[in-house]
Image (spheres, helix red, strand yellow):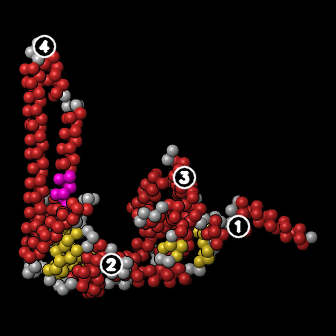
Amino acid sequence: MARFRKAAALIACAVMASTVTGCADTSYSVKYGDETVKAGVYIGYLQTELNNQLYTFSYQGIESKDYFSQQVDGVDLSEYVKNNSIKDVKEYVAIKKQFEAEGLSFTDDELKQISSNVNTSWDSMGGMYENNGVSKESLKEIYREALMRSKLFNLYYGEGGKEAPTDEELQKYVNDNYIRYKMIAIYKSSETDESKAAAENEEHLKKRDEYFEKGKDLTFDNFDQLIEEYRAESDAASEADSTQAEDSSRTDESSQADDTSSVADTSSAADTSSAAESKAEASSAETPDSPAADADSTSEAESKTESTAESKTETESVAETESTAEAETTGETEAEETDPYVNEAMIDLASYTDEDFETASGKLFKEIKGAEVGKVFKFENDNAYYIVVKGDVSQRTDYVSENRSTLVQSLKKDDFQKKIDGWVEAAGISVNEKAIKRYTPEVIYDRMVKYSEKNSK
């Protein structure tokens, strides 16, 4: 009889599991007090975390078949994604509880913005979310948590907040973690032919050293004049290359016209017995669809493209960041006329790791960090040849007022995370391991792949 009762209980449990209730209820991911968080919220976080890691792998050239054999921070991908997603759900609970405890709420405009963001996301990815087990309501909860987190941060650290940092604290953060610099960068050749690349780089290096000699004794403030001189020469070189290409094009076209005329005249003189035949031959020689004409046009276009590429490589320079090169090619703007800092950059190195400093840009920043303030120096990495001068960060006293929000985030993000960790600990959250085992990163990945394959046909 006891054996029968045990078997009946197992059957009942299996039935309840099939309806995601009771013994194997996987409809929720975590529980706190009498409340639960839908599994869809967990899956939503998991999907986002997984996508972020797969994007990184793809960027690194790792093939999809090898994704789940990779590690992140020394942990297998699947375990890493799972752990972070559980952490996200726990923080969702902690943020929600603290938001309510502080008596905070959303404005009507904020609620409208949340709905708008959810609708936009759902319009583009709703099918994928539903396929993975994420409802629109679960997605909305994730958006709500992001805004609750932001409002709590501002409550503590925003202007007038409970623990808002002073200007002096922010300036100290800038002094301790930022580098300030001006520079000229002459990019290395993009030629695939090694001999051509070596020849171009020799010219680039020569140009860098020429300008270094001109500017090696300049101060940080006066370095602008070297940048402007190099910029003017670069612009002039680009314009000259463009004009030369246009002149070459006109010469080729004129030469082709002369050749055509010559062919027509020869045809006419050689065969005076038939004027109609002469006209036909002349017309054929002038036809632009002839193979010879096509070959000339193609060669000319290729030559012009190569010339443009070489000109860009030779004349690009960086004054603030690498994106500044775009501004240099468009001419002087109104901002350049009024912004006293247009030629300089401020970079926060607080989050840089040893690995980051081994990248091309990281090596440059490391060199600048260790350089003497006001001393012009040369540098080279895999990307370019540089002339750099380091500035005194502490003199940028206006940087705090102009970038307060960003600086507060950087300065207080660790303190805020400690608060969240404390709230998580106090929330009494229990994880539904059955749901976690059911919705693994591998399962969600397979669903994503099958959905994409099905809907790409």
Nearest to viewer (mark 1 / mark 4)? 4
The answer for how far apart the CA atoms under marks 3 and 2 are is 39 Å
The answer for how far apart the CA atoms under marks 1 and 2 are is 48 Å
For marks 1 and 2 on the same chain, the one whose residue lies earlier in the sequence = 1
The answer for how far apart the CA atoms under marks 1 and 4 are is 98 Å
What kind of residue is marked 4? Ser
Label 2, on which residue?
A: 357
**Picture disc at residue 451:** 3
- 311 is higher (above) or lower (below) than 148: above
The answer for how far apart the CA atoms under marks 1 and 3 are is 26 Å
**Picture disc at residue 441:** none
Question: Image point 27% across, 70% down: which residue?
Answer: 382
Q: Which residues are magenta?
A: 306-313
What kind of residue is marked 1? Ala
Question: Image point 26% across, 68% down: which residue?
Answer: 383
For marks 1 and 4 on the same chain, the one whose residue lies earlier in the sequence = 1
Asked if residue 294 can be seen in this view, the reply is yes
The answer for how far apart the CA atoms under marks 2 and 4 are is 80 Å
What kind of residue is marked 3? Tyr
Res 417 → quadrant: bottom left
Callout 3 crowding tier (Cα within 10 Å): few <14, some 14–19, many ≥20: some
- 250 is higher (above) or lower (below) than 209: above
Label 4, on which residue?
A: 274
The answer for how far apart the CA atoms under marks 3 and 4 are is 71 Å
Between residues 315 and 121, which one lies in front from this camera angle?
315
For marks 1 and 3 on the same chain, the one whose residue lies earlier in the sequence = 1
What kind of residue is marked 2? Phe
Label 1, on which residue?
A: 24
Q: Are marks 3 and 4 in contact (CB under 8 Å)?
A: no
Q: Main secondary structure of the magenta part?
A: helix
Question: Image point 30% across, 72% down: which residue?
Answer: 360
